[in-house]
Image: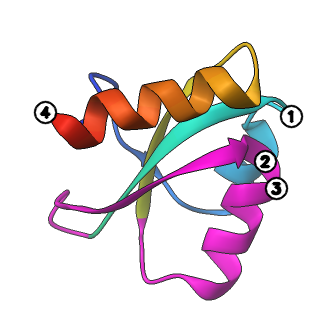
Amino acid sequence: MSLAKPWRDLDRSTVGSAPNRYGLYELGDDGKETVGFGTGVLRDELKEALAYGDATRVRWETADSEAHAERLLAEHVEE
């Protein structure tokens, strides 16, 4: 199930504005279709996605901890 957040372009500006904390992120393509989910420190993960991924859009939800981010991922993957 997708995050209930607006899509943002996956570019340097967006990566720079991403919080430096744990969270769940959703990557999307030009058609705004989901291409994957991930967890981790958002700024670090999005830097990697920008450099090596095929996604062009992103949205995220911050978490209180790594464990909380993993729980968010489990909730979205199960639905």
Q: Please say if 34 is above or below 76.
A: below
Amino acid residing under circle 3: Asp
Report x, y in % for residue 39.
Answer: 60, 46
The mark that comes first in sequence, 2 or 1, is 1
The residue identified by callout 3 is 44
**Whether residue 1 can be seen here:** no
Which stretch is magenta?
30-56
In front: label 4 or label 3: 4
C-alpha span from label 4 to label 3: 27 Å
CB under 8 Å between discs 1 and 3: yes
Q: Residue at x 28, y 34 (%)?
A: 76
Marker disc for residue 20: 1
- Residue beneath the point at 75% across and 65% down: 47
- Amino acid on which the number 2 mark rests in the picture: Arg
Task: Tell whether position 44 is magenta.
Answer: yes
State how far apart marks 2 and 4 are (Cα): 26 Å
Residue underneath mark 2: 43
Are discs 2 and 1 less than 8 Å apart at CB? yes
Q: Which one is in front, 61 or 69? A: 69
Rendered residue at 42%/69% (across/down) = 56
- Calculate the distance from the C-alpha at mark 1 to the C-alpha at mark 3: 8 Å
Instruction: Calculate the distance from the C-alpha at mark 1 to the C-alpha at mark 4.
Output: 27 Å
Mark pair 2, 1: CA separation: 5 Å
Who comes first in sequence, dot 2 or dot 4? 2
Q: Position of residue 5 (x, y in %)?
A: 34, 25
- The stretch drawn in magenta includes residue 64: no
Which amino acid does the dot numbered 1 rest on? Asn
